[in-house]
């Protein structure tokens, strides 16, 4: 059987330890080419560049661009075809619909989906520390192994007949984690603070300058930046079974099958609005 061809990228940069773990695990079961950002691109979503530049790397290429740029370049700019795009392993979880929507790790998979190639996003978390930061203090081999097992099984089945990509969140500190089929949890709110400078702001904004803080007050702030799984907080009650965040609170692997965004929906209310608009336009034309 021919080895599957995998394009590997991330949003933490080509030198990130999470990417290295994924590369080592994947190369045992696939022909892997890396196209990853030269620098950290966390939180850029599916932002694309009009122009970019590349540098050769022992595993492939480093691109002066975003994760979506890397996916696009790998799928359309190289003289080879790929069966799958893998993005990660991210140094922190990507859970909840708002966080997933702005994730550079997931953004690469969305770009791949629009270009007709299935993808898997993998992110790591720690059951006590939550964010795996600084990344060099953590071992990403376990998330990489779980991802590789999921990739192997997904490519041999019909998983991508209905899903454009899979979003995985894997604990680094659980020996044999349970895998749960989940959906991104829907909640979000924002707090604006003026004339403020705090350590939380510095971590949240990755050092950007300004005296106005735009803070997510739902996640992860409700759980805490440094240690969200405080015994005082009953997070299991906050997040329902079946949600990606509940799986993370319970120390399990969250696996969410997703499609590229902007999917059309049916709406009786909109049909009524359009019908009324067209009737009023026709009436105005008759009365001219």
Image (spheres, rainbow, N blue to C red):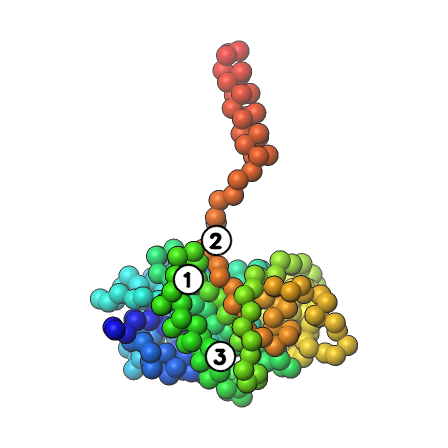
- The image shows residue 72 at horizontal and vertical percentages of 34, 62
User: Which disc, if any, is residue 134?
Assistant: none
Which residue corresponds to mark 3? 143
Q: Residues within 10 Å of mark 1 (few under 14, many from 20)?
A: some
The residue pinned by badge 2 equals 261
In terms of secondary structure, where does tag 3 sit? helix
Q: Using residue 203 as the reference point, say whether residue 38 is left or right of it.
A: left
Disc on the earlier residue, 3 or 2: 3
Q: Residue furthest bottom?
A: 137
What distance separates the C-alpha of mark 3 from that of mark 1? 20 Å
Name which quarter of the figure residue 165 lies in. Answer: bottom left
Rendered residue at 28%/74% (across/down): 3
Relative to 112, residue 174 above or below: below
Q: Position of residue 46 (x, y in %)?
A: 45, 60
Query: Residue at (58%, 70%) from the top-left corner?
Result: 205
State whether residue 59 appears in this view. yes
Q: What distance separates the C-alpha of mark 2 from that of mark 1?
A: 18 Å
Q: For this view, does 54 lie left or right of residue 264?
A: left
- Say which of marks 3 and 2 sits in front: 3
The numbered mark, 3 or 1, whose residue comes first in the sequence reads 3
């Amino acid at each position: 059987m021919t080895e599957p061809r995998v394009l590997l990228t991330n949003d933490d940069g080509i030198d990130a330890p999470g990417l290295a773990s994924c590369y080592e695990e994947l190369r045992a079961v696939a022909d892997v080419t890396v196209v990853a950002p030269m620098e950290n691109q966390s939180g850029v979503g599916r932002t694309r560049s009009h122009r970019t530049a590349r540098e050769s790397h022992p595993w492939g290429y480093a691109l002066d661009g975003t994760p979506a740029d890397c996916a696009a370049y790998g799928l359309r700019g190289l003289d080879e075809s790929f069966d799958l795009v893998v993005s990660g392993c991210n140094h922190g979880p990507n859970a909840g619909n708002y966080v997933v929507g702005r994730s550079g790790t997931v953004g690469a998979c969305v770009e791949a989906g629009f270009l007709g190639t299935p993808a898997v996003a993998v992110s790591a978390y720690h059951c006590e520390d939550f964010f795996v930061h600084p990344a060099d203090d953590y071992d990403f081999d376990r998330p990489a192994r779980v991802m590789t097992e999921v990739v192997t099984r997904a490519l041999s089945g019909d998983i991508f007949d209905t899903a454009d990509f899979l979003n995985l969140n894997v604990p680094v500190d659980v020996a044999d984690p349970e895998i749960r089929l989940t959906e991104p949890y829907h909640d979000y709110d924002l707090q604006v603070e003026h004339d403020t400078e705090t350590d939380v702001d510095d971590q949240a904004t990755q050092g950007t300058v300004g005296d106005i803080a735009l803070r997510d007050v739902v996640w992860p702030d409700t759980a805490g930046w440094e240690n969200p799984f405080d015994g005082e907080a009953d997070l299991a009650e906050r997040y329902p079974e079946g949600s990606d965040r509940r799986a993370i609170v319970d120390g399990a692997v969250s696996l969410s099958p997703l499609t590229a965004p902007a999917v059309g929906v049916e709406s009786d209310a909109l049909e009524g609005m359009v019908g009324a608009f067209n009737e009023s336009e026709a009436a105005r034309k008759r009365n001219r």
